[in-house]
Amino acid sequence: MIEVGPNAYGKSAIRLVKVVRSETPHRVRDLTVAIALEGDFDASYSAGDNAGVIATDTMKNTVYALAGEHLTGSIESFGIALGRHFLSEPQVGVARVSIEEHAWRPVGPSPDAFTRDASSTRTAVVAVGRDAVTVDAGIAGLTVMKTTRSAFEGFPRDRFTTLKETDDRIMATKVTASWRYVSGEVDYDAAYDAVRSTFLEVFADHHSVSVQASIWIIGKAILERHPDVEEIAMSLPNLHHWTVDLSPFGIANDREVYVSTTEPHGLIEATIRRSEGGR
Amino acid sequence: MIEVGPNAYGKSAIRLVKVVRSETPHRVRDLTVAIALEGDFDASYSAGDNAGVIATDTMKNTVYALAGEHLTGSIESFGIALGRHFLSEPQVGVARVSIEEHAWRPVGPSPDAFTRDASSTRTAVVAVGRDAVTVDAGIAGLTVMKTTRSAFEGFPRDRFTTLKETDDRIMATKVTASWRYVSGEVDYDAAYDAVRSTFLEVFADHHSVSVQASIWIIGKAILERHPDVEEIAMSLPNLHHWTVDLSPFGIANDREVYVSTTEPHGLIEATIRRSEGGR
Amino acid sequence: MIEVGPNAYGKSAIRLVKVVRSETPHRVRDLTVAIALEGDFDASYSAGDNAGVIATDTMKNTVYALAGEHLTGSIESFGIALGRHFLSEPQVGVARVSIEEHAWRPVGPSPDAFTRDASSTRTAVVAVGRDAVTVDAGIAGLTVMKTTRSAFEGFPRDRFTTLKETDDRIMATKVTASWRYVSGEVDYDAAYDAVRSTFLEVFADHHSVSVQASIWIIGKAILERHPDVEEIAMSLPNLHHWTVDLSPFGIANDREVYVSTTEPHGLIEATIRRSEGGR
Amino acid sequence: MIEVGPNAYGKSAIRLVKVVRSETPHRVRDLTVAIALEGDFDASYSAGDNAGVIATDTMKNTVYALAGEHLTGSIESFGIALGRHFLSEPQVGVARVSIEEHAWRPVGPSPDAFTRDASSTRTAVVAVGRDAVTVDAGIAGLTVMKTTRSAFEGFPRDRFTTLKETDDRIMATKVTASWRYVSGEVDYDAAYDAVRSTFLEVFADHHSVSVQASIWIIGKAILERHPDVEEIAMSLPNLHHWTVDLSPFGIANDREVYVSTTEPHGLIEATIRRSEGGR
């Protein structure tokens, strides 16, 4: 016997820009939205029955139609409004709304000119179910570097180990982090700013003995300082910077000239969470 | 109390080319390998203890070192050999090896000239644990189109629905599929070719009433024809092709001229599996 | 005094798919088209006068509108038809039409199922002027490799030279080539196939002492065999494959295991042309 | 007779990071460098003679070796030093050095933590010849938007024109600009900052009747304010933002909700230059 297992469907890469003209300067909201529905959709697969299949084109229209009224605050709030809308159809069990917000900053004192700040992307994934709503906020594409106070020593050596121990290396990574809020009232915009600030502050201040240790130190600080955050997951590529050997040319190179690389890269992924009551 | 939750670490984007010179023509094996380890690594986070942290640089070296002896057959077999190697360290619980194989074809009768076939990528994810090994094979980047025998009708209409029903649309998608083999002996190369052939054959032959129905029809055929396959997951973007309205120019356009789009796109994801005995 | 210098404007990334249903199997024409106009447009800059500025939106409409009637043969012919259309406006001096054709192949014997052949892209740039038309055909994204019969020796050595001479290296490159046809009647589809075949045949057969020498050998053969071709320009990145040093592990590696790289890469660009009468 | 026409070769995508530790905070210089040589290289093509072919690997080494001593100020100065180095070989006629600088900003008051500012890339192309040096500075990837004071009216209408005139549209573009400095002493860092500031200020302040007019107004202002600049070339895609028609849903949409698009896009390219004495 063959059956349909886990499944979801929806619309991705919905590009939405909303200009709020009532503020000075204007405010530009630039989102990429994805909708995914789970629920009672087996018949759409095994019986070719489209009676319950909300068209993904309708999802797209809905995102634009609701943007005027519901995209007035955080992307998390907009996601919740969208998710609740799709639950009006009984076959939908969970509506998952993923939103990326691309930042635009005003140019000087101009009321109507903006420049895109591509240095990171704010993300949110809202899952609206019949009984519960989960809200995950996050950040993507935030590239950071420590030029000192980063080491990697004491690791095991086997036949294939050639890496030298170092007490002073460059650490660079492109951060993808996502944290889940406790249920209840959260000021999502303020919480995002606060978590991002803590991330950068602790990243800057700590001494790193490994990327793993950095994840722990940063994650622990975020959980300690922000009671609204239940857990945080980080995915940190280790973007290696190798000291260039200039000795064949009679040139010293004491942590000055590096080659930066993207292939291959380390990849360290972990969740830091509250061990009691948090889940 | 704060603790380390689920975590893994390793090396990604290890680019390996092996030239088999004992065959005529030569054979080019072009792989991108990623290693990820799970196990007893909490202390590397919470105590900054690197004593068990096999360096990701060592992982990279290991992939190259073992390629000579162990990359002689399928990427799945190479992945199993790599995974077993990393289990020689007791702190490792599961070694997950992900491999992409990029195809090269001989140019004419030449023994030593090749052209890259970028039309799809073969993938494998092998998870070697203390008690079990799972092998998932797959394909990525296979872009296919049906120019007729594709419809989408009978879907629900609400206030935000503007999509017209159609009994003849273009269906195009960029396939990502992954299937799990039953445990035991499998001829991975032959199985891959067979599943890929079935995919293309059924894709070409069936009448599609929706992407969901296509996933079912193709997935069911693969499970029926290939007893080695326990389940198959597909992720199919619906790459919309919209008929261009040429009527303002007095030009008819009966399913002839389309604009192809990537943003936004539908996204349909499902697993088709055996309902008894398969898991 | 400040003035407008060289300028052009137009529409890029026009995505057009045409399905030819009168053939069995159907034929899928998948193009990306760009239009650029040069001519008497200074006033649109310095005086803000749009009276002569054909809207780029109109260009897009025109591409779709003319596809039915004029996209019946080669992309070069379609480009010429498009270019001539835009010259109907007197302010246009040259209409440059750039077209990429993305290949689709039928799946088995099916009349209506196709798979995208992403292994290379056919290109054309047609410049239709008041007095002359130039037609450049080309190929992009064709990745090729020689596993032997490639060397690099005899180069100069200075203080910063560490590269060893080698009489047997891997040569790999991602070809971008563009050739200009002599004016007059050319069977563009046949010519494209012929030049592409010559490229691959000579690439496979020749012994390479450098990428430069390969460009010469291939380019010369193309000019010798194809009188319709006036000159050919090639841009060949040297995608280095470095032999992995496995000696620290006691493993021999005689041209077997390589690391493939993309950064940094050599880049060799040259035009091979007829020295008399060709221009 | 067949001959070698225009040609150049070199190394691209050389990734270099230099950490200046003598400043507090440290300074991170993150460059991507490309070297291209032109000169007496015909024999390397037509005779396979490598005697004059400086290995591209040597070029890479040279970039790293000279970074310590010569990358102390602007990327333009580093480019000139690199170019002069390569002219020490007599067969080199022109050494072209292209550099992208990727910006890093300190995190808070930390002396050693940085975040990548991906909002734009500074560029320089230096061509060092036997008789002359040209220096082109530029900016890439600077994405800007005007939410009002942008129009497009008065353009010609033909059979294929459907675009409506508008006196209030969004204008968005991803700027690539490059300006040539007059020969002689220039403070390249100060000049870059000044030109960039003028670009943003004029972009923000002006009323745009077309992208062409914007290029003129911005370019003219840059030439007027910066006598060091001889000419400026801009390549501005018109990244269309279309007002979403929400009227089918009974929702008004007065310049509030837009769909942002990348395909197709307008593309306007022009050089603004001094008409006397500048060239």
Image (cartoon, coloured by chain):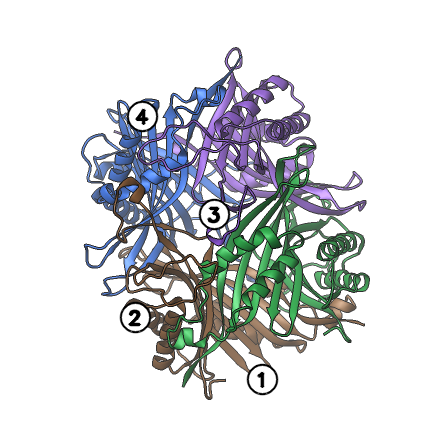
Chain colours: A blue, B purple, C green, D brown
Q: Are tags 4 and 3 found on a single chain?
A: no
Q: Nearer the viewer, mark 2 or mark 3?
A: 3
Q: Which mark is residue A89?
A: 4
Disc 2 packing (10 Å; few <14; some 14–19; many ≥20): some
Quarter location, residue C84: bottom right
Image coords of residue B102 (percent x, y): 63, 41
Q: Nearer the viewer, residue A268 or A62?
A: A62
Q: Is residue A250 visible?
A: no
Q: Which of the two labelled residues, at mark 1 and mark 2, occupies the earlier sequence position?
A: 1
Q: Which mark is residue B245?
A: 3
Q: Circle 2 is placed at which residue position? A: D206
The answer to whether the residue labelled 1 contacts the one labelled 4, judged by CB atoms less than 8 Å apart, is no
The answer to whether the residue labelled 2 contacts the one labelled 3, judged by CB atoms less than 8 Å apart, is no
Q: Which amino acid type is shown beneath numbered disc 2? A: His
Q: Nearer the viewer, residue B91 or B194?
A: B194
The answer to whether the residue labelled 1 contacts the one labelled 2, judged by CB atoms less than 8 Å apart, is no
Quarter location, residue A62: top left
Q: Nearer the viewer, residue B275 or B122?
A: B275
Could you tell whether D229 is left or right of C32 in the image?
A: left
Q: Are tags 4 and 2 found on a single chain?
A: no
Q: Which amino acid type is shown beneath numbered disc 1? A: Asp
Q: CA distance from mark 4 to mark 2?
A: 49 Å
Q: Is residue D244 above or below residue A112?
A: above
Q: Nearer the viewer, mark 1 or mark 4?
A: 4
Could you tell whether D1 is left or right of D124 in the image?
A: right
Please tell me whether mark 4 sits on a helix, a strand or a loop: loop
The chain letter under disc 2 is: D
The chain letter under disc 4 is: A
Q: Which mark is residue D131?
A: 1
Q: Which amino acid type is shown beneath numbered disc 4? A: Glu
Q: Nearer the viewer, mark 3 or mark 1?
A: 3
Please tell me whether mark 3 sits on a helix, a strand or a loop: loop
